[in-house]
Amino acid sequence: MPAPPLRIEADYLVETIGDPRRAVEIMAGEQSSGTFVPVPGETPELKARSAARVERLEILEERIETPTLPTTAVTSGVEIRRARATLSWPIENFGASLPNLLATVAGNLFELKSITGLRILDIRLPAAFAQAYPGPRFGIEGTRRLAGVKDGPIIGTIIKPSVGFDPQQTADLVASLCAGGIDFIKDDELQADGPHCPFDARVRAVMRVVNAHADRSGRKVMVAFNLTGDLDQMRRRHDLLVAEGATCLMASVNSVGLTGMIELGRFSTLPIHAHRNGWGYLSRHPLLGWSYVAWQKIWRLAGADHMHVNGLANKFSEDDDSVIASARTCLTPLFPDKACLAMPVFSSGQGVRQAPGTYGALGSTDLIVTAGGGIVAHPGGPAAGVAALRQAWEAAVAGIPLSQHAREHRELEQALGAAA
C-alpha cells in the first residue's frame, strides 16, 4: 500500500452554489487559519504554515436544478454544481488527535450556506496517528483464537427477543445455542442494564452456562455483552466480564462517543465489538454525512476489533454493493506498518440464503455473520438454526448450490423452506 501522507487528507463530495473552487477554498479557510473576513495576524507566513490546502478538485456536474439541502442563500439564477475535492492540513495544527481530527474534517462545513450538499468520502492520516492510538488489540487473529474458530466464518446470533428476557431466560437461550455449536452470541444493542435484566445478573447467569459448556467441550463460546454506558460504568462492567471469564464486550460507538471509545480501547483487555446503531443518520442521504470508508477508520484506530457493516438483502435501506465495500474496507490495512484490521460483522435479516452472495462478493471468510431470527426462529429450534447457517456457508465456500447441499442436510433444507 502507498506510504501514509505527510499531511492529513480528506476527500469530499461537494454541492455548492456558484464556483466550486471558491466554495472549497472557503471550506479550507473555515477549517484552518481563515474566517469570513481577513483578520490581523493572518500573514502569508502563517498561511504557509497552518492553512489547509485544496489538493485536488474535479467538477462532476455543471448544473443541478435545485439544491439538495435547504439553505438561506439565494439560489435563483445561480448555478449549482457538484465536485470532488481533496483538502489537506498540516498535522501541526492539532497533532495526532482523533477528536480534533473530527472537529477539523467534519466541523463547521455542513452548515455553510453556500454548501448545499457535503459528504466525507475518505480520510488519509499520517503515521503519527498509528503511533498515538492502539488500534484493534485483537482484530481477526485474536478473535479467531478466543472464539476457537481457526478458519471459515464465525457463526453468530443475537439474543432474541431483543429485550424482555430476564437473566435466567437469557442464559437458557444461550445454553441451547452453545449446545447447538454456535461460535458467537451478542446482546442486542437495546439490551443494557434495565431492572428487568440487570447487566451484572445477566453476565453471571450467561457465563455460568458458557463456562460449563467450555468445561465439557473444551471450547468457549464468545459472547459480546453490551456494556454501553458512561466511562465509570463501562470500566466496572468490563472488570466484571473479565472476572467472570467473558471473552468479548460490545459498545454502541455513536452512543459512547469517540472519547468514550478511545478510553474503552485503552483499558479493555477483551475484544471490542463495535455496534454502529445510528449509522443511518450519518449516512443515509448520498449528499450528506459520511461514507463508511472514511468513518470506520476512526473507530478502528480507537480500538474496535469488530465493525458492523450491515448484510446482503438486509432489512434496511443500504444496497448490497455498499455493504460489500464496507466489509472490504475493514479488511484493508490503515498503515503499511500497522494494518489495524477489524473483523466485519454481517447482520440485519441475515440467514442461509445470503451465504453464497456474501462469500462470492467478499472472497473471504474473515467475518462474523450474526443471524438473529435466521437462527432462533428455525423450525427445528436454535441448534438447528446454527447447523443450517454453518451448512450454508460450507456450501458457499465449496461452490455447491444451496439447493443441492440441502438434499443431504436437513437443517439447511428446513431453513430454505422457511425462508421461501
Image (cartoon, rainbow, N blue to C red):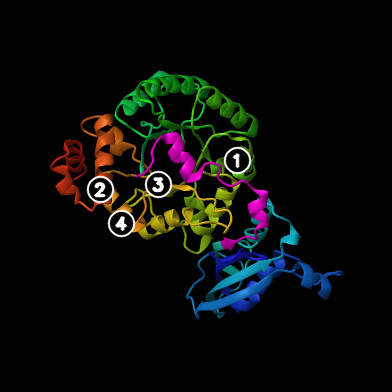
Q: Does the magenta run of residues contain 282?
A: no
What is the x, y in percent for residue 390? 28, 40
The Cα–Cα distance between marks 2 and 1, rounded to whole angstroms, is: 35 Å
Residue type beneath disc 1: Gly
Amino acid found under the numbered disc labelled 3: Leu
Q: Residues within 10 Å of mark 2 (few under 14, many from 20)?
A: many
Asked if marks 2 and 3 touch (Cβ < 8 Å), the reply is: no
Q: Which mark is residue 367?
A: 3
In the rendered view, tell whether residue 214 sits above or below residue 105: above
Residue type, label 4 = Gly
Neighbours of disc 3 within 10 Å: few (<14), some (14-19), many (20+)? many
Residue hosting label 4 = 360
| Snapshot quadrant of residue 11 | bottom right
Q: Residues within 10 Å of mark 1 (few under 14, many from 20)?
A: many
Graded by Cα atoms within 10 Å as few (under 14), some (14 to 19) or many (20 or more), the crowding at tag 4 reads: few
Q: Which residue is mark 1?
A: 265
Q: Is residue 63 left or right of residue 113?
A: left
- CA separation in Å, label 4 and label 1: 33 Å
Q: Is residue 65 visible?
A: yes
Residue at 21% x, 30% y is 380
Front of the two marks 4 and 2? 4
Q: Residue at x 28, y 45 (%)?
A: 393
Q: Position of residue 378 (x, y in %)?
A: 24, 34
Q: Residue at x 66, y 67 (%)?
A: 88
The residues colored magenta run 123-152
Q: Element under label 2?
A: helix
Look at the numbered disc 4 and give the secondary structure of its residue: helix
Asked where in the image residue 178 lies, by quadrant, the reply is top left
Query: Helix, strand, or loop for circle 1?
Result: helix
Q: In terms of sequence position, does the residue under pointer 4 or pointer 1 come before the other?
A: 1
Q: Looking at the image, tell me whether mark 4 or mark 2 is earlier in sequence order.
A: 2
Q: Which residue lies under the disc numbered 2?
A: 353
